[in-house]
Amino acid sequence: MNEIKVKIGKNGTYTNVTKLVKKVTVAGRRGDAPRTLTAILSDSEQYTRATANSGEGQNVFFYSKKKELFRGILMTDNRSNKRTLSIKAYDNCIYLCNNKGNFSFKNKTATYIFQYCLKQLGLPLGAAANTVYVIGELIKKNTTYWDVIEDALSQTYYATGIRYYVSSEKGKIYLRKRREQTSMPLLSLDTNIKTYEMSRSIYNTRTRLTLITSKGNSKGSTIDSALEKKIGRFSDIESVDEDITQTEINQRIKTFKMEKGIIDKDLKVSATGDTRCVSGKCAYVKISPLGVERIMFIEEDTHTFENGHHTMDLKLSYDKTSGTSSGGSSSSKSKSGGNKYKVTANSGLNLRSGPNAGVIATIPHGETVTWDGKSEGSWYHVQYNGTWGYASSSWLEKA
């Protein structure tokens, strides 16, 4: 049974409406600014009715097991003859979406643009990762603050291959680099996955890229001949500055191959709820029938709390999991010349998704693993049979 709590109110005066709650859903998606909460409450004369009014600037707080999962502004309330009250709230990133302006930035980073937008709207800043890359010029007229931030982050991604995402937590807004966490939830058929669905598509796949300046000069190109023989020719053109450097050209081509030079694969799962599974973060996924055993990033999440139970529906990115600037998956990070270690534990050594996290494999006694030099305390980040995870260094000796 899941312990939840819902409060509605403003200016420090809140009403606990938990007893009226029938169902709560919290959802988010990468690329969308705000997370949302929808709830269905009883609205009958036999109860003290909830005083929810979206025109009063009320806020909604939601907790699960005493942990705050959502806070935001009540945007919609709806009562019906079914004697129910439906509400929908958005976290404070909604102000980035529902305000427009004119913008002109020269030689600024996405970090600067993000902080500028928050300051203009009076939104509280949590922290902002340093995106480093300097955007030559970004001019937008009559557009939302969110569109400007997304444009800046998109340009940064195509120039560096590094993704960043915006999130609101406890009323403060953060800009974070999307990276693999040292500790993450495990999703598997043996533990929590109820249903899964994997799909493939070449609709957005491109086999050729040409980089063109505003004057029509070509600055570079690439062709994936092997893929083109299989699926046919699909070409793309991207605009670049006249003074683009060779390093920047190489990165644009590298990012293109990572983003569009592949066959899209998506994985959708329904599972027992885990509040750590939110858009922008990652999970270790193990589904043997699909041959999946790897770290994947969460693109969309929907958490449902109903009748004392917590379930979730997730969409995970299959190939575009860039925890670093390389954009590769963890299963492809093998480093030649890495340190080799032998397992000394007689009963085998558990390989975990993170220090003290879920077990993803058991390495038999005497087997060899590769350590990439990364560690968390006494835990080594190692590879075994193509899978990366964490193992206790106490049971490893130099091979």
Image (cartoon, grey):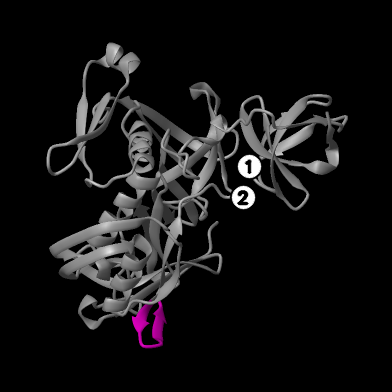
In the picture as drawn, the residue positioned furthest to the top comes out as 229
Q: Is residue 36 visible?
A: no
Tell me the quarter of the picture where residue 261 sits. top left
Quadrant of the image occupied by residue 334: top right
Q: Is residue 13 visible?
A: yes
Q: Amino acid at mark 2?
A: Ser
Q: Residue at x 43, y 38 (%)?
A: 269
The magenta region covers 8-16
Counting residues from the start of the chain, the first of labels 2 and 1 encountered is 2
Q: Can you give x and y, in whole percent of width and height, for residue 138 in the image?
A: 22, 59
Q: Nearer the viewer, residue 94 or 158?
A: 158
Q: For the residue marked with disc 1, what is the amino acid?
A: Ser
At which x and y percent is residue 114? Answer: 33, 66
Place of residue 91 in the rendered image (x, y in percent of width and height, measured from the top left): 34, 68
Q: Residues within 10 Å of mark 1 (few under 14, many from 20)?
A: many
As drawn, 175 above or below 363: below
Q: Would you say residue 153 sits in the magenta stretch?
A: no
Point out which mark residue 353 bears: 1
- Asked if residue 7 is positioned above or below residue 231 in the image, the reply reads below
**Left or right position of 45 against 239:** right
Q: In this picture, is 240 found above or below 166? A: above
Q: Residue at x 78, y 43 (%)?
A: 392
Q: Nearer the viewer, residue 216 or 159?
A: 216
Tag of residue 272: none
Mark 2 surroundings: few (<14), some (14-19) or many (≥20) residues within 10 A: some
Q: What label sits on residue 183 in the rendered view? A: 2
Viewer-proximal residue among 125 and 158: 158
